[in-house]
Structure formats: C-alpha cells, structure tokens
Amino acid sequence: MLARPAMQTPRLLARTSIRGSRLAKRSLVQLRAEKVAAGSKLGALKAFLSAAGGLLLRRSKSSRLQDLGSVSGKDFVLRARAEKSPIAVDEEGELDLNPGGEDLHVLLAGREDHDYFCSPVPLRLRFFGQVPEVRVGGQLAFPLVGADRRLPKAFWDTFAAQGAGHDVAELLRAVRAFLLDPAGYLGLADSEAPEARRLQTWCRDAARLNGARLDVVRKYRPQARFPELFDASTLRPEWFPAETWQCLNPGLEGPADLVAWSRILTEHAPKEVYSFPLFTEEFCDMLLEEVFHFYSTGLPARRPNSMNNYGIILSDIGLEPFIDQLQGLLQPMGRELFPGPGSLWDGHHCFIVRYREGEDLGLDMHTDDSDVTFNICLGLDFQGAGLQFCGQVGSPEHRQHALTYQHRKGHCVVHLGKKRHGADDITQGERLNLILWNHSSEYRKSRGYRMPPYAKESAAPDKVCLSYTHDRDFGTFKDYPEGKGHFRGRGWCPPTQAEYPGFKPEMFRASKPR
Ligand SMILES: O=C(O)CCC(=O)C(=O)O
Ligand SMILES: [Fe+2]
C-alpha cells in the first residue's frame, strides 16, 4: 500500500492521554448532549444549540443542510452547520448506512498571534453516545490529539470538572482553549510534574512540526501566480465544465444523485471505477503554472509518498482551503458511488504526481492509503502512461486485470483506495496528475475496514497486475526493473492462506533431480 508521509512525530502520536491528580474523574453526564442522543432528531439538536445561545439558527439555501449560522460578534466559531449523519459504526464495528443521527460541523477560529493555530480548524461533533465525539480536522498537528484526531481523556476530564450546565457553545470554547494552549487548559502550565514537562515537550514538537510547514506556506503566499487559488473560500464555476458544475451543485431544483450524475459519469468497472470531466483545460493550465512556479522557487515540499520522487503535497504549499472545498464538492458523489468508504470524509491527502523521461516514468501496482481516490489528469502532452486496474485487495481477483484507463486532461477517474492499480511507463512527454485521497475516520472504525476478509486468489496473477514492492511471486513471472532488485524477497502478497493453486514464491528453486 502507498502510505502518506507521517505528519506527527511518533512521540506525539504515541501518548494521547495523560493523567493528573488534579483532573477530575467525573463522567460527562452533565453535558446536555444526552438530550440529543436520546432521539438524535434534528429538532432536538436545534433546540439544544439555540439553548447554547452562541449559535444563530437559519436555513441554508440547500434543502438538505441546516446552516446553523455564522456567529457575528462571537469570534470562536466561524461557521456551523448540522447535517444528517450518513453513516455510523457501533461498538461492535457494525456499519450503519442510515443511522438517523446528526453531525455538527464547525469551523473553529484560531488566533492570529498563535504559532500555528492561526487559521481556522474544522471540527466535527457527533451526538450518538452520551458524550459527543469531537474530531479535529485539518492538517495541523496538535499535542495530545492522536492519529484518530480525537480529543484526549484529559480534556474531557477537565471539561467535566468545570461543573454542570455545559452546552455546545461552552464545549466549543473549551476545545478552542485546549487546542490553543493544552498545558494552560489542563492546569499544567506552571507545574514541574513529569507529565507537565512531557506536555511542554509535545507542545514544542507540535510548534516545530507545524512551523516548518507553515513557514513554506507563508513564504510562498506573496509569490503565488494565482492568488485566487489560495483564497479559495469558494470554488469558481468557471474552473469546471458547465455541466459538471451543474451536476455537482444541484441547488434547490435537483437532487444530488446517481441519476443526475449519469449525465457526466462513465462507469468503467461496475460499481468500482468511474470517470467524469472535472476541470476545464484552462483551469488545468492555471494549476500547473502554479505548481511549476512553486518548483522554481526552490522552497522545500514533502514528497507525496515513498514511490513518488517528484510530486508535491498541495496543502504544504498553501492550497489546503482549495482542497477542502474540492473535497466538499465531491463528497455527495462519493457517498452515492461508494456507500461507506465514500461517506463522512474528514481527512485528505492531496498531491501532484509527475512522470517524465529521466525522472519517475510510471508507478508500481499498489493500493492507496485512501478510502476513495480521485485522480485528475492536468496534462501535459504525453504518450503511454495508461492506468492499469486489477481487483480489490483481499478478493479472489485481486491480481487479475480489470481494465486500462487512458488519462485525459481535465478528466477525473474515481476508485476505491483498495482497488489495485498502477501507472504504465510514460513513453513520451510529461504527465502531471492531481491525486485526492479521501479518508473517513468513521468508516475506518468498521469491522469491514479493520478486519477485511482475505480470499484465496482464483488463479495465477496477470503479469500486468504484479507489483515488485508487494508481491512474493514477482520474480517468478518477471525480471525486476533496474534498480529495484532489492525488493526481492520483501513482498507480502499473497498472504500464505490466500495463495492460488500452484503458487510458487519467487525465491523458489526447484530441487535438482537426483
Ligand atoms: O499516475 C497515476 O495516474 C496514478 C497515481 C496513483 O495511483 C497514486 O499516486 O496513488
Ligand atoms: Fe494510487
């Protein structure tokens, strides 16, 4: 699997809760979310929020969303809206595709003079249990916020200790205070206790990690060729073909569903691989000009993954707001095409891949660390470089060829991250694509994601589906590409229980006849 580079140091990730004698152990029953949890009806949520006083209630233009208002005069919440929950996963890992609750999406204001929490951070609150679940979105690393982006127990203990009568506005204020200054919020700012000192180190680590990334963003911003890309609080209709824009923004008159999208969608493999025109050629040119301009500054940027040596991560150059908007635009389509993995995206990893003579030519077969992937070709002129699709990991057809997709400028191919795919070598020219990996932390709690079944392979693999980084039998069928021989013997696929009849691992040597 191709994995994204780690955002946080292991130290930050490893310890997500601390205990302190001064932290109360009371449970959070005071939180009036239980009122909501009981029925989880939107009306109850509205009442709950208006009782909170800080959030104004107003209907949005879209018939499906309730916009709970920008909050004038309150600087801690910039935007809040409630939405019917598309999925929920229970304690047993069962995925419910129609759970009937609501989620509250909030854009929490940062503070201008803060080291790194100086721009807004998205939060999602779910009201299924007694205590709302809060997830911190965005790309910033926060001390004590783990890889799952949940708040640590120490936060909830401190919040509970502050007494009865909590409401959502208070909760949001508390989350913001905690994210701005964890030690201060937990009452550990002046403490000499070991846990307090550890926390101070984590805070310094977070400042350093975020600082390195934000430094590049700040330096590049005044040099940007197209400031409108960086100010993308809204996407511009002219960036998209008219029909695509209409389908993705049905407004009041049309439902957002597969019937409407069938006007633009091509299904390449039933229920698994689709494509549609997403960007105009002019927009592709503009985005590429920006990317090349960034390259020309020599500013550092992380590579998207271990196998792509010339791409860049777009949020690292300041395009996170644009990607957030793009993900929001595509979310309804994802939900309809791929119920479960296509629902409730709360994370992304978005990057450019680049192939040309003398650099990376193609990409080995792999699956993505993504629930649903959108892959958009931005140009330039090229030949070869087809995208090969095989089966889904764990299925009997995992390494059987399914289709070859030919990239077209402005067009987007959509697939599940677990579908095996790889890019043929480019034979002429240069290709750059924008890849958007979408993550749903709720879906990732499900048993289906955590413990997927792994079936026996139906037959020997098709050659085109072999991976030199993944497979135990690559060398049985093919010579290793130049410079890749060190992968021999390091593959894991197929796992022993999934071997096809007659499987021969690559290190297999027939014994000499006696
Ligand atoms: O080059 C392509 O079209 C495929 C890129 C890809 O699959 C990836 O970066 O994960
Ligand atoms: Fe991929």
Image (cartoon, grey):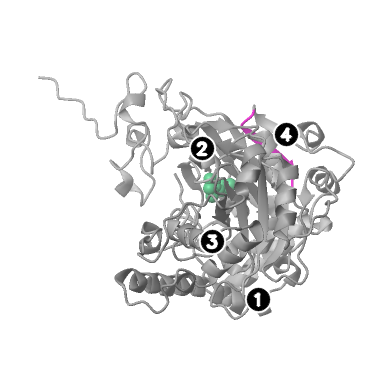
298 shown above or below 33: below
Q: Give the overall secondary structure of the magenta segment.
A: strand
Residue type of the residue flagged with mark 4: Thr
In the rendered structure, find residue 163 and report the number of the disc placed on it: 3
Residue type of the residue flagged with mark 1: Arg
- Please state which of the two labelled residues, at mark 1 or mark 3, is closer to the viewer: 3
Gap between marks 1 and 3 measured at Cα: 44 Å
Gap between marks 4 and 3 measured at Cα: 56 Å
- Please state which of the two labelled residues, at mark 2 or mark 4, is closer to the viewer: 2
The residue wearing badge 1 is 221
The residue wearing badge 4 is 266
Q: Nearer the viewer, residue 262 or 88?
A: 88
At a point 46% along the width and 32% down the height, the residue shown is 92
Residue 90 included in the magenta stretch of the image: no
Q: Is residue 458 visible?
A: yes
Q: Where does the magenta region start and end? A: 271-278
The residue wearing badge 2 is 418
Judge the density around disc 1: few (<14), some (14-19), many (≥20) Cα neighbours within 10 Å.
some
Gap between marks 1 and 4 measured at Cα: 37 Å
The mark that comes first in sequence, 2 or 4, is 4
